[in-house]
Amino acid sequence: MKAKIVKRTLSLITVLTLIFTLAAQGVSAIGSIDINKYPYVYVHGLFGWGEDEGIDDTLPYWGSASCSLMDEMNKSRYESYAASVGPMSSNWDRVCELYAQITGTRVDYGAAHSEKYHHSRYGRTYSEPMIEGWGEPDADGNIKKINLIGHSFGGAAVRTLTALLEYGSAEEQAATAPEDISPLFTGGKGHYINSVTALCAPHNGTTLTYIADNMNLTELGEAACYIYAGFMGRSKLNGYVDFHLEQFGLTRIPGDDSTPEEAFLKAFITIMSQPDNAMFDMYPERAEEINKMAKPVDGVYYFSYSYQTTRKTLVGTQVPMAKTLIVLRPMANLIGVYSRNLDTDYKIDSSWLPNDGLVNVISARYPFTDAHEDYAANAELQTGKWYVMPTREGDHGTVIGMQCTKRQTLKFYYELTDLIESLPVTD
């Protein structure tokens, strides 16, 4: 009897020893594997805001009424940040602001760009970086990268930032002394980015720009927006919403009463006379120019999501579905019947009719100039090309949590981040 007990005890000890040995080896093996886990920087779209603004405490842009997405993602150990850039500014200006915010430096809009569009070269200074050690090697020699996620016009910003980091700007290099140029414009840093994800982005512009022109609303709309921005940006409410237009002298930097300020009328005339704004950049012709510059970068993963909130009618046009946000229904209807461009040489046909209320589905799928393919689960993904996700049902606000439950919003972003973190680490 004692012999059996001793034998069983020895067997149990042997089994436990083997289990602990294998577990230790497994932990060691896991520790030696490169894990694709980098911080996430989210970039808002037109008329949006980030975590620096007071409105985000009341109504988060990311998550909307469903939740504070940044809080939830950080609780789940996905290091996440919501950047704040000009809600009406041009793609170029927004990228310069984004870079300065991530690096904790002064905004440099570039000597060539600033001279061309008649505004100040420098903007505000960020005293602390959003991402500490971004682009620097860690103890093992691995570069600390980031993942970029852009909604709507933020999709243009995240891919343009990536392209500028890699390819630089020949115009800025020609106009600026080497010791005076921003690192954003010198190139060779595309490996600072791990992935780029665009959500409902107008990669190829939106036909809503043509429609606004035909209705004589473009200049009126711009004027109304700039008057509102000028009022808010010079009042005690500055900072609750931040328009980032100090380069034109239209608004002050929040919390800095010493910001140089042009007379309102002078600043207003200057900004209205320049096509250096978001509205201009969303014309299909202008989007085509951005696409030629913002080429994909080898070593970076690209994903694009589109949404559709319209259905086809018997006559071939598109009308909004019942769940479409009320404020988006008029635009969805207008885009849904605009199938012929009579104002410019840019070809528009019926393939541009399906939309999410602001952006045509065909435009949100991928930039026409770039390599792309439909995403397939379990396929080996390559860098430097767009993986186009299946078009989802919903409108322009669905993907940021509008008219969604917390569970629905988090499910989408958990699946997205899990996909990104399952990818092989690149050099």
Image: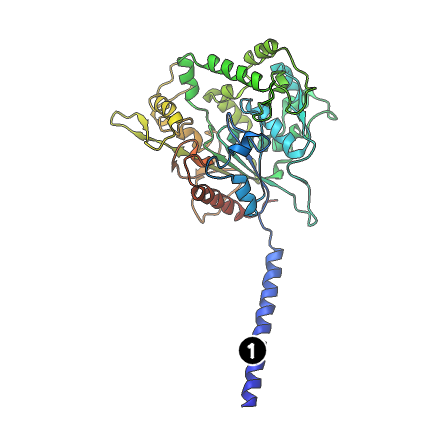
Residue found at the far bottom of this picture: 1
Foreground residue among 419 and 326? 326
Q: Which residue is located at x 59 percent, y 57 percent?
A: 30
- The amino acid marked with disc number 1 is Leu
Foreground residue among 191 and 254? 254
Q: In terms of image quadrants, where is residue 258?
A: top right
Q: Could you tell me residue 66's position as x and y percent?
A: 46, 38
In the displayed structure, 342 sits above or below 132; it is: above
Foreground residue among 59 and 424? 59
Q: Circle 1 sits in a helix, a strand or a loop, which is it?
A: helix
Q: Could you tell me residue 220's position as x and y percent?
A: 47, 12
Whether residue 404 sits left or right of residue 29 in the image: it is: left
Foreground residue among 194 and 83? 83
Q: How many circles with numbers are drawn on the protein? A: 1
Q: Quadrant of the C terminus?
A: top right
Q: Could you tell me residue 400's position as x and y percent?
A: 47, 35
Residue matched to label 1: 12
Q: Which residue is located at x 73 percent, y 26 percent?
A: 178
Viewer can see residue 103: yes
